[in-house]
Image: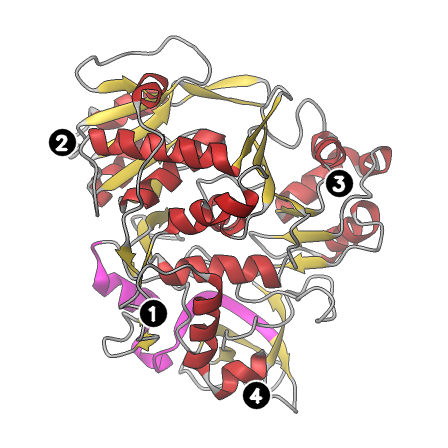
């Protein structure tokens, strides 16, 4: 695959896009570089992300469980692809009734839930652009995002449940909307999760369950151009105001699909569990879109890994027979500290692959993950990627790439990585440098919402000769035969 990408880069990605995505209008143009760095992929093709995640599975997988939802209190509810499709269609019709349409922006501020995924998929179904805000963010952060994105509607909940405690959400929405700049928001749809008392604005607020009950379960997808923005996700970075990372529909979906297949070696019988919240890019690519696009069954968890005790993750793996488990090094280290021997008290024999995401994993945590959780038989996919990349960029493909504790190893097929000096010249030895991506890739960031100049300056500085600047440093070893990098350590 790497050789094929080297020999015919556009052809490599075009072949995958035709094989893996259902297009309403097939594309003829693969990569348009005429307005670089505002690259366009599959631009003359039309598709719908929700159709690719739901409708295309109905005939063969309609009765397959799509989501296994475990609430904070341990109660479990399952939803099939057929039932999820009906709920998404109902809520898409609800959005349309509220005047939301093609290109309108919708803020989603919800707890981790089936409803959060329904809301995202419903936006995609009608061509609206969602911007999910993590439920732990403050009213001030929420306000910044509502104003910057120009949201027309906000979807929230009366509250959530985390670690045995109720968390308020509607209060933060009310506070954010009381500030200047939110005049475009006409309605707030509220999911009743806790039943707690909340303030209510009868002229603006609407109950989710009442609207959904009256909506039709039939909603034809809106076919959009491949470059139509699927979502905007804000990342604060180290300095400055939050950046609204804008992702396309076609290229982003292809990245999520291929990384699910390549990095996780996903099979039809797998039970997949990514522990990330949908408020982050990991929860977009590996909860809301990637697993559904390939017809996976996945676990969705409302709570935290340490409640009611530090055995919660291992208990859930045993209960749901999870085969692919994807979590963060921070969670791994905290679980080691709180109960390093706890995994031995549970049956984890269903596991066949482990994943790490969000930051570099230190070798000591990697070895514990490998020995205690994986029993020295599960490959570990240590994945490097970013909100801006949309999907995995560097990771050891299980069974194909030798793993090294603390290393994300090699770039995926079709991802052209290099390590360079500050002037853009290549680092030729084993020394460190700046990590760059030399060629555009389908799932890459398309723009910073409303700020193209900041986009160019932040990610494509002139001194780097058109390379994408990741903002991370790396050390590696370049192999003599292929000239490709094995990235050993990310900082």
On the image, the x and y values in percent for residue 434 come to: 48, 73
On the image, the x and y values in percent for residue 402 come to: 74, 70
Q: Nearer the viewer, mark 2 or mark 3?
A: 2
Q: Secondary structure at mark 4?
A: loop
Q: Nearer the viewer, mark 1 or mark 3?
A: 1
What crowding class fits label 1: few (fewer than 14 Cα within 10 Å), some (14-19), or many (20 or more)? many
Q: Which residue is mark 3?
A: 336
Residue depicted at x 21% and y 46%: 102
Residue depicted at x 55% and y 61%: 259
State the separation of the CA atoms marked 1 and 4.
31 Å
Q: Can the viewer see residue 76? A: yes
State the separation of the CA atoms marked 2 and 1.
35 Å
Q: Which residue is mark 4?
A: 428
- Bounds of the magenta segment: 450-475
Q: Which residue is mark 1?
A: 41
Query: Which residue is at the far bottom?
Result: 481
Q: In this image, 427 relative to 43: left or right?
A: right
Marked residue nearer the N-terminal end (2 or 4): 2
Q: Nearer the viewer, residue 278 or 351?
A: 351
Marked residue nearer the N-terminal end (1 or 4): 1
Callout 2 touching callout 4 (CB < 8 Å) = no
State the separation of the CA atoms marked 4 and 3.
38 Å
Q: Nearer the viewer, mark 2 or mark 4?
A: 2
Quadrant where the C terminus is found in the figure: bottom right
Residue depicted at x 23% and y 75%: 35
């Amino acid at each position: 695959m790497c050789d094929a990408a080297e020999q015919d880069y556009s052809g490599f990605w075009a072949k995958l896009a035709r094989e893996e995505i259902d297009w309403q209008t097939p594309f003829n143009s693969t990569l348009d570089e005429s307005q670089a760095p505002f690259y366009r992929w599959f631009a003359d093709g039309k598709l719908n992300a929700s159709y690719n995640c739901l409708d295309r599975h109905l005939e063969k997988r309609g009765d397959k469980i799509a989501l296994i939802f475990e609430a904070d209190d341990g109660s479990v509810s399952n939803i099939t692809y057929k039932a999820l499709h009906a709920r998404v269609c109902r809520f898409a019709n609800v959005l349309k009734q509220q005047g939301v349409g093609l290109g309108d922006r919708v803020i989603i501020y919800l707890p981790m839930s089936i409803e959060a995924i329904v809301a995202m998929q419903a936006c995609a179904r009608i061509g609206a652009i969602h911007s999910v805000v993590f439920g732990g963010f403050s009213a001030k952060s929420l306000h910044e995002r509502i104003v910057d994105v120009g949201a027309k509607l906000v979807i929230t909940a009366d509250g959530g449940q985390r670690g045995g405690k109720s968390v308020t959400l509607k209060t933060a929405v009310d506070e954010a909307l009381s500030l200047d700049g939110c005049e475009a928001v006409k309605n707030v749809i509220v999911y009743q999760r806790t039943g707690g008392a909340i303030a209510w604005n009868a002229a603006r607020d609407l109950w989710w369950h009442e609207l959904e009950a009256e909506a039709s379960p039939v909603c034809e997808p809106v076919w959009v151009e491949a470059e139509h923005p699927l979502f905007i996700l804000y990342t604060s970075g180290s300095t400055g105001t939050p950046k609204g990372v804008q992702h396309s529909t076609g290229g982003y979906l292809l990245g999520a699909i291929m990384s699910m297949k390549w990095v996780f070696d996903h099979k039809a019988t797998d039970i997949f569990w990514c522990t990330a919240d949908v408020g982050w890019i990991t929860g977009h690519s590996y909860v809301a879109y990637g697993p559904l696009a390939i017809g996976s069954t996945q676990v969705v968890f409302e709570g935290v890994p340490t409640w009611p005790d530090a055995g919660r993750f291992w208990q859930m793996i045993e209960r749901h027979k999870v085969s692919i488990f994807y979590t963060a090094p921070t969670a791994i280290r905290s679980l080691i500290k709180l109960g390093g021997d706890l995994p031995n008290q549970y049956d984890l024999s269903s596991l066949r692959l482990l994943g790490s995401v969000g930051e570099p994993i230190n070798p000591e945590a990697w070895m514990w993950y490998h020995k205690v959780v994986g029993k020295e038989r599960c490959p570990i996919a240590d994945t490097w990627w970013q909100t801006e990349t949309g999907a995995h960029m560097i990771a050891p493909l299980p069974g194909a790439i030798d793993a090294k504790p603390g290393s994300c190893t090699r770039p995926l097929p079709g991802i052209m990585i290099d390590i360079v000096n500050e002037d853009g010249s290549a680092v030729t030895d084993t020394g460190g440098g700046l990590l760059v991506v030399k060629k555009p890739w389908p799932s890459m960031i398309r723009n910073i919402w409303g700020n193209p100049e900041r986009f160019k300056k932040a990610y494509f500085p002139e001194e780097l000769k058109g390379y994408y600047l990741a903002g991370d440093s790396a050390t590696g070893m370049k192999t003599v035969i292929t000239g490709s990098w094995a990235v050993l350590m990310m900082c």
